[in-house]
Image (cartoon, rainbow, N blue to C red):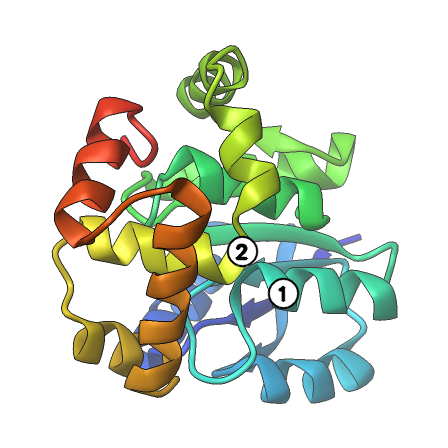
Amino acid sequence: MAIRLLITDDYELVRAGLIQFFKMSSEDIEVVGEAANGEELIEKLRIAAPDLLLLDLAMPGKCGIDLISYIKTLYPGLLILVLSMSNDVNTVKRAMKAGASGYICKDCSPQALLEAIRKIVATGKYLSPSMAEQLAFASTSPNAPYIEHTLSDRELEIYRLIVDGKSLSEIASQLFISSKTVSTHKGHLLEKLGLKNVAELVRYAMQHKLFS
């Protein structure tokens, strides 16, 4: 019986490419639906009843870790494989904690993606060996538990983008929130970490290898 797969990514070209790839490369994977954002995804889940959801984290509207948590409340048994541009350890860790069954980066090989899907369906979990090693290393860092319990998912997301050199307006545009909201989160970051400005935020992240 074929694995029923639903693809969610805000880029139509990415979705079309993945659909064509699975059609040509695998007889045991059937794409039963696609969605461009969180709202559309929720509607498609009601109709398609997939075995596995292939999910991009960065989309308009409801997205990211919050979307994973929400989906798992609606469909506890649904397998979720995150397919993301980010290999940030904190993001991977929070995605898995929220209920993702696996995590793979978009720069992976096509064969690696097929293997990840099949392994999740067979065993319920997937992480590449390199990513599993990074997570194990991060868990031994004295800063990891402090950051995880102090900052919210959205604060961590904004923190990472700040470290990447994004301006507040660029972050607002990427996350589809207002610049004022980004500024508020930045203020919370500074307050919680006892820092004074963006330069100190960046320095702190580099010193503790938070997003490496």
The residue sitting at 85% across, 65% down in the picture is 73
Q: How many marks?
A: 2
**Separation of marks 1 and 2 at Cα, in angstroms:** 8 Å
Q: In terms of secondary structure, where does tag 2 sit?
A: helix
Query: What residue is shown with label 1?
Result: 66
- Label 1 is placed on what type of residue? Asp
The kind of residue on which mark 2 rests is Asp
* Residue in the image at 69% along x and 50% along y: 98
* Residue 15, image x, y percentages: 41, 73
Direction from residue 191 to residue 145 in the image, left or right: right
As drawn, 5 above or below 193: below
Bin the neighbour count of mark 2 within 10 Å (Cα to Cα): few under 14, some 14-19, many 20 and up.
some
Foreground tag (1 vs 2) = 2
Residue at x 39%, y 84% (from the top left corner): 177
Q: Which residue is mark 2?
A: 153
Write down the quadrant of residue 54 in the picture.
Answer: bottom right
Residue 93 in sight: no
Query: From the viewer's perspective, is residue 24 above or below residue 131?
Result: below
